Image (cartoon, helix red, strand yellow):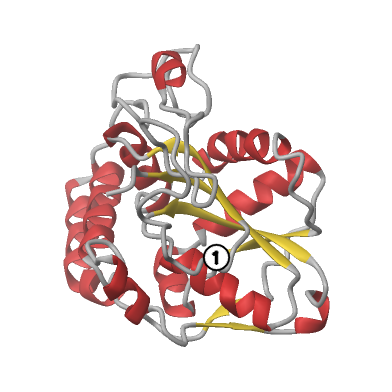
Amino acid sequence: MSKRTKAFILNLYMMNVKRIVSNSLEILAFKEATLDILYPKEQVCAVCANKLDKSAVLGVCIWCLDVLPQISQPYCEKCGKPLDYKTEPCNECEGVNNYYEQALSVFEYTAGVQRLIYRFKYRGEQYLSHFLGGFLSKRLKEQKDWEYSYLVPVPLHKKRLRERGFNQASLLASEIAKNLNLTVLGDVLLRIKETSVQAGLGRQERFVNLKQVFSVKDSLKLKGQSVVLVDDIYTTGSTANECSRVLLEAGVKKVYVLTVATGRPK
């Protein structure tokens, strides 16, 4: 690539970055993506950042694949957060009116998993949806007591969707549907109000931030049906709970929640 072309791309980046992205994480992701175009790097593991070899699986080295912290018992039977010992419910769910039946995640939200999701979500490495969707499919298939008809991805606001170029929850739901021969209803749950970034907000702040954010279109498709709500991260459960409330009000029978990762109760 010529110096003139590099200078042009960098100049274009500086002129448009504020218009293209709206929060610090996405600014960082856009900047890194631009630098990757100018100065290509070796393909590295999405978790540990070491160079990949032929044994890698969809962007993750075989060593990280073996040690990714998959959640197993004990975990909260309501929100799915990993626990040190069995207790019902966990301290975060106690006294809380959760509208969903049960939430489950594949991985504990450690630093390695955080890097994996960051690269998928903010660096546009959409191929990681195949890797993550495979684990989600396995987790869902194991839930013999979940009865559902459709997968419903948590929506992005149209402005955020234009900026990012894709909805990570939709990609994950599509992978699950492909693996398990299920149907995704990607246009029935809408995010009608733009909100500030959820990262860094507490439970109460997230609750306020999400008021009147979601709505349901074409509720006849959902009436009397049970669904699995799909997203990338379960943090406080505010998003999952608000989506579940809106879906139930639209006539959905039951809502289950499936996400890539969640942390431990605080």
**Camera-nearest residue between 199 and 9:** 199
> For the residue marked with disc 1, what is the amino acid?
Val
| Residue at (38% x, 38% y) in the render | 116
x and y percentages locating residue 243 in the rendered image: 55, 72
Q: In the rendered image, is residue 197 in sight? A: no
Indicate whether 210 appears above or below 113: below
Identify the image quadrant of residue 249: bottom right
Q: Position of residue 237 (x, y in %)?
A: 43, 61
**For the point 27% across and 52% down, which residue is it?**
34
> Horizontal and vertical percent for residue 121?
41, 52
**Direction from residue 27 to residue 176 in the image, left or right:** right
- Depth check: 200 or 81 in front? 81
Q: Is residue 122 above or below residue 14?
A: above
Name the residue that disc number 1 marks.
Answer: 154
115 over 16 or under it: above or below: above
Quarter of the rendering containing residue 195: bottom left
Number of marks: 1
Q: Which residue occupies 70% across, 40% down?
A: 143
Helix, strand, or loop for circle 1? loop
Q: Is residue 95 left or right of residue 199?
A: right
Q: Nearer the viewer, residue 15 or 8?
A: 15
Q: Is residue 97 left or right of residue 10?
A: right
**Compared with residue 188, is residue 145 higher up or lower down, i.e. above or below?**
above
